[in-house]
Amino acid sequence: MATIRIPTQLRELSGGASELTIEGGTVKELLAGLDAAHPGFAERLHDESGGLRRFVNVFVADEDIRFLDGIDTPVAPGEVVSIVPAVAGGA
Amino acid sequence: MPYVLGLRCRECAREYEIAPIFTCEWCFGPLEVAYDYEAISGAISREKIAAGPASIWRYSDLLPVERNPAVDLGAGFTPLVRADRLASELGLGEVWIKNDTLNPTNSFKDRVTSVALSKALEFGFKTAACASTGNLANSVAAHAAHAGLRSFVFIPANLEQGKIITTAVYGGNVVAIDGNYDDVNRLCAELAGMYPWAFVNVNVRTFYAEGSRTLAFETAEQLGWETPDHVVVPVASGSLLTKIRKGFGELHTVGLLDEEPKVRVSGAQALGCSPVAAAWLNDTENIKPVKPSTIAKSLAIGNPADGYFALDAVRQTGGGFAAVTDEEIVDGMRLLARTEGIFAETAGGVTIATLRRLADQGVVRPDERVVAYITGHGLKTLDAVADQVGPTATIPASLDAFHAAFDPSTFDQ
């Protein structure tokens, strides 16, 4: 069980909620659980190959999962998972 | 705005109206300006450009701004310098330096800022803001002052002292953040959602990034409407490299080039922050963000927004990448200064060191016409060379002392 933070752009899918509590022990399981509870998340977060879209970032306890085990990153009970659209910047 | 059709997502091609927005609400991909190239072809000509101002605004038909130019300190149309001494040192043939140190605030950022703030005025913004590794801070503070806009510039607190002073002098708000550029960027993304400010590289980034294409336009014009065979471009977010490549192609699309350009594009990164070069060297699609540690602070973006596009551009054009050490960077700065009389900041050292590496590896070849983009002035990063150079001799004001220090028999008589 973990808390998932939903970015503004996706709150139409969560009924306006900024946070949801979902069952799962890895990022992959949590995202699958999220789509099961609120259909529509999967097609927004994943590309055709099933991986995360290139401009979707996921943080577990404030660490980018690309620094961890990617989509297989384990999530301890009670931890916070944030979905954050990639930040533009620089040039 | 006759020549702009709207905005388009670079990932999924969804279309949007012109607005200060920067990501696709569907897939979060970055948006890009879509032009009516057919209309531009009818309006633009080499003669019309030649009769225009000696600035980026000579290409206004290709810029996404309605009132040209609204915010202009004279950015662009910088010298393209033939660099024979550097070429011979590197074992290359025809090498040119695009010397973008000679912009109003001494970096290429004046190009993008001039476009971004011109657009910001059109949108009715009254405050200009940015997240910056330094050069953009200088540029936004200066252009905002010139345009009478309030400014908020956010920088990592560990930035070079010179870049802080040369930002603060313009009188806007300079906010030093206890963190790296990616931390600064994240805060700015949150602030951009809260306040109606023109964050040039967040909500106005779609327009801002278009300004970089002028580097390609100028290069081709200055080569007599021909293109280089190979360009070497420093990579921070990856936007500059991507847009230079795009710019060459657009010149052909609108009929300004006789032949379709075949420009190989190579990217330059510092080893201490080389997420894009690492992906290229490891032959992977995945760009893994890094925590930067390099003297090339203007390139220290660990989570590059346009990294994928830069990687694609290098792969598609058969270019290369190098990730160079801090020592090579300083050597590169000194090599360029010594051979060509151009003093570049650390990012320029990265570019020259990369050119050297790629020349040694045979990626950049002696039969190619090469252009290296030098994007910021050496006075911005004096610390990098401060302990390496100094007076050749320190002597009393006497002929004897001078002759003791230097052997007159070696002088031209």
Image: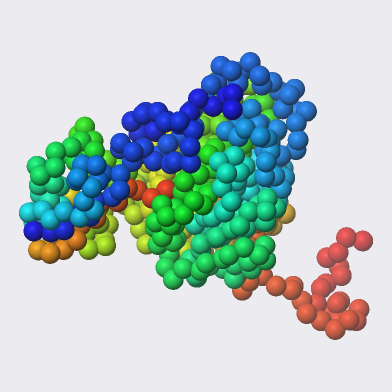
Instruction: Classify the position of the C terminus of chain B by image quarter.
Output: bottom right
Q: Is residue B64 above or below residue B84?
A: above
| Residue B366 in view, yes or no | no
Q: Judge by depth and name the residue closer to the eye, B412 or B354.
A: B354
Q: Which of the 4 quarters of the picture holds residue B98?
A: top right
Check the image and report above or below for B331 versus B278.
Answer: below
Q: Where is residue B277 in the image (x, y as percent from the top left)?
A: 40, 48
Q: Which residue is drawn at 68% across and 35% down?
A: B68
**Residue B399 quadrant:** bottom right
Measured as percent of width and height from the top left, residue B404 is found at 83, 79
Q: Which residue lies furthest to the bottom in this view?
A: B396
Choose top left, top right, bottom left or bottom right for residue A46.
top left
With A48 as the anchor, is B44 left or right in this view?
right
Q: In this view, does A15 lie above or below A59?
A: above
Residue ID at (59%, 58%): B151
Q: Is residue B194 visible?
A: yes
- State the quadrant of the N terminus of chain B: top right
**Residue B391: horizontal and vertical position, in percent?**
74, 73
User: Going by the image, does A20 lie left or right of B287?
Assistant: left
Left or right, B22 with reference to A70: right
Instruction: Choose between B41 and B385: the one closer to the eye.
Output: B41
